[in-house]
Image: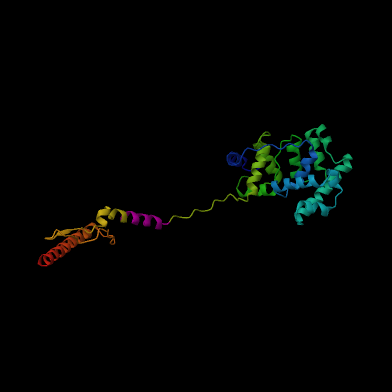
Amino acid sequence: MKNSKEYSQKVHRLYRSLKRKYPKVKKAVYDQPVDALIYGIIGEKMSDGAARSVIKRFANSFIDWNDLRVSLPKEIVEMLGADTPVTRDTASALSAALMAIFNKYNTVSLEALKKIGKRPAKQALDEIDGVSCFTVDYCMLTSLCGHTIPLTKKMIEYLRNNQLVHPNATQQEIKGFLTRQISAENAYQFYVLLRRESELGRAGTKTPKKKKTGHKTKTAAAAKSKKKSCCAPSCCSFWIPRSRTTSRNSLTIWTSSPKRAHPPRRSCLESGRLRQRSATLLGSVNRAFSTCVCSW
């Protein structure tokens, strides 16, 4: 693949970020290669969670894989979900693959592939009808100890959209490039992490951040200026003083109520002037009132 050194750094950077992002992956190992083959056929065009739920429904509905082989395509489509082109293609691929295995080995089993080498086993899988490249790679990785990385269409699109591989590279070239970058020990983990990320539907393009307007900063500055202009509570609000006048008969008269007044906030200078005016006014009222009491 062209510019392999440049893309190699990107792939290793992606692998490190995915390991930090997702929890640890537990490797799936199939004792029977036919189990991995059936999952590969179903999981190629479905998500991982949907494929595993279908496998559970198959296990609850069919006695064994031979029972699935002799089932009608309509029955298989009902087990896969809604009647769509994807489910119909998957059902026909399952029927064709299981029938091809039965015709070659006289049983719905691929146990014989464990007794031969990896290359002959891969050739035997390629010759099965209804089996795609993804299914063969998944079966080799999870059941026959092969060093490969299965790739779905979403995974390939994700790699291309994020410029992790050359845009003109084919599926075989991408698979060979990733196999050289990722070791056999980490191949399954890389496959699972990359598949999870691709199934989230993230294109990898960064959305531009909205520019912060100065409205909030201006309002915050205005609020601070208001707080600074306001002095102590004694300056912003005042008490109406209470004064008393004693008459000849020792009668104590209160000239104001002890309740606190809450005028609108004013500056310190204005509040000081108001206190002087109120004190002058109350003094004149007290003198007038005391004069009236004395004359009385």
Which of 8 and 216 lies nearest the eye of the viewer?
A: 216
Say left or right for 70 vs 187.
Answer: right
Residue at the far front in the pictured view: 249
Quadrant for residue 133, please give it.
Answer: top right
Asked whether residue 170 is in view, the answer is: no
**Foreground residue, 255 or 122?**
255
Residue beneath the point at 83% across and 48% down: 95
Q: Is residue 110 magenta?
A: no
**Residue 208 at x, y percent in the picture:** 51, 53
Does residue 157 sit above or below 107 in this rendering? Answer: below
Left/right placement of residue 184 relative to residue 78 reads: left
Using the image as rendered, state which of residue 261 and residue 201 is in the foreground. 261
User: Looking at the image, which is closer to me, 153 or 226?
Assistant: 226
Residue 238: which quarter of the image?
bottom left
Is residue 104 something one can see in this rendering?
yes
Q: Which residues are magenta?
A: 213-225
How would you classify the magenta stretch by its main secondary structure?
helix
50, above or below 252, in the image: above
Q: Which percent across, then down, holds residue 5?
A: 60, 39
The answer to whether 113 appears left or right of 271 in the picture is right
- The quarter of the image holding the N terminus is top right
Q: Position of residue 98 (x, y in %)?
A: 84, 45
Q: Residue at x 82, y 53 (%)?
A: 75
Q: Tell me if residue 220 is in the magenta stretch.
A: yes
